[in-house]
Amino acid sequence: MGSINFNNALGIHDNALQVRAKRAEVLANNLANADTPGFKARDFNFKAMLEGEKSKRSLEMATTSAGHQRGRVSSNEDLLYRNPSQPSIDGNTVDTQIEQSIFTRNSMNYNSSFEFLSGKFKGLKGAIRGE
């Protein structure tokens, strides 16, 4: 029987939470710039980014201290431009209703991932206590 560690216990869900948080930032930036002339709405492909994270799971970063945390630096290379359904005359491609809808769905998914991880941690705490 293998040892219990966070990678075995949490799987990809901790990375999914981080990706959803990053996406919320991008979507909030789109909404904040809805009236900025020439602003181009950005987003990224969540599925492709998560698949990339899953493929990296086998190549863990070497650490020299137990206090080091593994992570990934996200860059603007992951961001794509959204294709507008009806661009405005001033060149802004933010459709507020679509952005709000996507932001709301992302928030719900974030909360679901958070609740899932919270349940996992409660289960791990119970196992440690022998409950």
Image (cartoon, grey):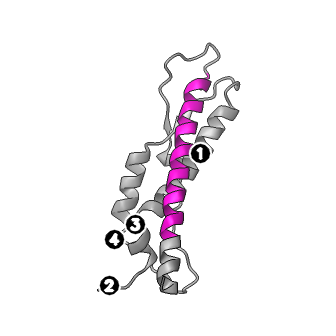
Tell me the SS state at disc 1: helix
Identity of the residue drawn at 40% across and 66% down: 11
For marks 2 and 3 on the same chain, the one whose residue lies earlier in the sequence: 2
Q: CA distance from mark 2 to mark 1?
A: 36 Å
Specify the farthest residue to the front: 131
The mark found on residue 11 in the picture is 3
Q: Amino acid at mark 1?
A: Ala
In this picture, which residue range is highlighted in magenta?
92-121
- Callout 3 crowding tier (Cα within 10 Å): few <14, some 14–19, many ≥20: some
Identity of the residue drawn at 43% across and 43% down: 45
Residue that mark 1 sits on? 24
Q: CA distance from mark 1 to mark 4?
A: 27 Å
Q: Main secondary structure of the magenta part?
A: helix
The mark found on residue 122 in the picture is none
Where 3 sits versus 24, above or below? Answer: below
Q: Amino acid at mark 4?
A: Ser
